[in-house]
Amino acid sequence: MNVDIGNALDGDLGLTRGDLDALDERVADAHDRIERGRAEAEHGYAALNLPETCDPDAVRRAADGFDPDHLLTVGIGGSALGAATLTDALGSGVDCRYLDNVDPAWVRAILDDVDLSGTVVNVVSRSGTTAETLSNFLVVREAMESAGVDWTDRTVVTTGEAGNLRSMADRHDLPALKVPEGVPGRFSALSTVGLFAAEIAGVDLDALLAGAADEAERLAGSLFESPAYAYGATTYALAERGAATNAVMPYAESLERFAEWFAQLWAESLGKDGRGQTPARALGATDQHSQLQLYRAGPADKLITLVRPREADDVDIPETDLEGLSYLGGSSLGELLDAEFRATEASLAAAGRENVRIEIDRVDARGLGELLYAMEAACVLYGELAGVSTFTQPAVEWGKNAARGLLGGGEFPEADAVTEKRRLEVE
Amino acid sequence: MNVDIGNALDGDLGLTRGDLDALDERVADAHDRIERGRAEAEHGYAALNLPETCDPDAVRRAADGFDPDHLLTVGIGGSALGAATLTDALGSGVDCRYLDNVDPAWVRAILDDVDLSGTVVNVVSRSGTTAETLSNFLVVREAMESAGVDWTDRTVVTTGEAGNLRSMADRHDLPALKVPEGVPGRFSALSTVGLFAAEIAGVDLDALLAGAADEAERLAGSLFESPAYAYGATTYALAERGAATNAVMPYAESLERFAEWFAQLWAESLGKDGRGQTPARALGATDQHSQLQLYRAGPADKLITLVRPREADDVDIPETDLEGLSYLGGSSLGELLDAEFRATEASLAAAGRENVRIEIDRVDARGLGELLYAMEAACVLYGELAGVSTFTQPAVEWGKNAARGLLGGGEFPEADAVTEKRRLEVE
């Protein structure tokens, strides 16, 4: 993986090479802290050890014997996004769906659309009590029973050491994977949580983890020596100077979900204490006809992160007699996409708008391993530099308690606030 | 449609009812300006006349005789997003795909995945020269020829009065729809541009336009009398007070694409002169486990726009013996989603974070007509209040010219800037 921060310097926000040199001392200290956390497998830091602690054989054993047409992963947030990022980018052959919402019509449509007798279900919840996930799982289980399909033959559980789902797995002798200790959901793509779906979808788990291990080895006490830290330090420095938004714009449809995964990682880890950088999801070249106007000519409060593979398959553009389009004939979609990438990057730079280029060799298992690991390490570094509690999510818990209280799932003071909505309605 | 701005008042950004009362005089003036623009069908303002000027019969005639399994809409930006929003939310039966990017592997995969002999192609470009769209169309046309399918039997053109695509349609006697004058792409969902796909996908065009007409009738000289203006004025007032981001969070999977359509409308119309509000796409309840942490506890620089239908189909949650989950049994996914919606809204309000609730009766043609029209009118009002040139997109043109120059499509000074990339690479 390669990170090019040249266009992050001397733009409208005024970050200079000298600023990065000065920041680099703090990067060294933060790196020491991160390495200590990794050595002691502290909560959160333990996620950066996954390339070595994750056991892909356990995942393979859980998947062994299954050869489904469809995989339904029932999970929400970090229990779905890592797996979805991997199977969207790399999966082939198996139709992977993610029940990560409780929209009734949508859940019903998915269940009607798949052949449940050719489906494997992976229910993912560390606690075994996540309301959305468990509700959806109960609905899926009943749909299987109604269809005459034995759910115990085709359900794999991914959960913590104990709890509801663990007991259910024991009772019915289901394959069960353990969510690793010390790894928050949004950092769990490279663990059992992300890897089961990847294995079912035919992803090369060894190459994925090897890519991640490569980036782990490159973590170093200087931002100029580690792509992950170059990105984390630059985003932090720009945020301090007013880059309130980080727009992540991959130039590959297969990485669209990666931008969503990144958005969770960034928002939930760094959005606290009145601080944080807002992730925005974009997609090249499509959003050149949409968001680029704002990025180039709107407020100077953004970093644009451009992500692309260096190599990809290509499709030739046929010759044409359509007027004014002869320049396209003999070219290719890949060349057009490449020209659009370089034009957007230059367009932003010419307008003084900071941007960073991240490149992987290809959208393959190794490339994804590098990319996901590096973004996680970048996020952890940013959190250290900003002094936030990277691995907690207290604001998410508030809403969970309120919803649970509203549904009669116990006494939660948060539920009382819900009745007090102030109204000013215009119809 | 109903807009509730109660939670936009007296939050961290300090907007008060008195501020809105004061702003309302400017809303009256802006409304006069908008009505003048509509009366004279001025560029951009003409879009707000579509409920009466759009001729759904012309769309029906163009679609007449087609009964495809797949519809491939070849267009980018506003030439795809409106149609995609409608067919994602309301379509049934026909598989609608949008070739709105030039990623080669992705284009190839779509062409491999559909039966071209059962496919209708709608190529959409006002100018007939959009590089991405025309390139993709040339690739699609060749794929049809290779598959022994006569593309002239199954191609519908949507374009301007003259140009490449118009000539091609004349030459091959293809059904051709006219992109209306004075309607920028991002405001064209309710025109021929959005309606052809909707018609093919079985959407009730009359109900859609009737919903839009209802909102048009409610435009009035006070924000307290028009839902569209209530939203436009409130977003403007909050942006002036520091709401740099507008996070649009529908609580319906079928409206996920609506958030993307909104993002284009908002970014491309209002992002200019160093100003504008950055749209962020979110989805309830899923993003409660992701973005909510940032929205609630990050910087006080956001408005959260919560969108939902008042009514929807439901799915019961089965009773369960799983420990601690008995409260879910006998409830429903819809009740859970509703509790999550209210909990999130209250959670944000309790933290002082401004939010607005937008409700339509159902996700149906009438509701979508109301919603899309109201958001367009809100955007136009915001543009008037902010004094920006709502209907232009100069920054998008820069990148187009640069890309075209890079590909040898003519002499464009913008292309010269592309070679000057400043590099600072970390590998």
Image (cartoon, coloured by chain):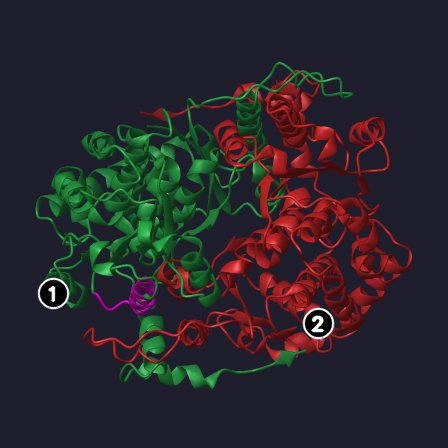
Chain colours: A green, B red
The answer to whether tags 1 and 2 share a subunit is no
Q: Position of residue B330 (x, y in %)?
A: 34, 80
Q: What amino acid does circle 1 point to?
A: Arg
Q: Is residue A218 above or below residue B376?
A: above
Specify few, some or many for label 1: CA neighbours under 10 Å numbering under 14, 14-19, or 20 or more: few
Q: Position of residue B262 (x, y in %)?
A: 61, 55
Q: Give residue A272's mark.
A: none
Specify few, some or many for label 2: CA neighbours under 10 Å numbering under 14, 14-19, or 20 or more: some
Please give the residue where the numbered disc 2 appears in the rendered image: B23
Please tell me whether mark 2 sits on a helix, a strand or a loop: helix
User: Which chain hosts label 1?
Assistant: A
Horizontal relation, residue A365 to residue B124: left or right: left
Quarter of the image with the N terminus of chain B in it: bottom right
Q: Which residues are magenta?
A: A128-145
Please give the residue where the numbered disc 1 appears in the rendered image: A171
**Quarter location, residue A5:** top left
Horizontal relation, residue B64 to residue A151: left or right: right
Main SS, magenta residues? helix
Q: Position of residue A72 (x, y in %)?
A: 33, 53
Is A133 included in the stretch rendered in magenta?
yes
Q: What amino acid does circle 2 point to?
A: Leu
Q: As rendered, which of A172 and B288 lies closer to the eye?
A: A172
Distance between mark 1 and mark 2 Cα atoms = 64 Å
Residue at image position (43%, 57%) is A110
Q: Outermost residue, left direction?
A: A40
User: Which chain hosts label 2?
Assistant: B
**Visible in this render: residue B328?**
yes
**Quarter location, residue B231:** bottom right
Is A46 included in the stretch rendered in magenta?
no
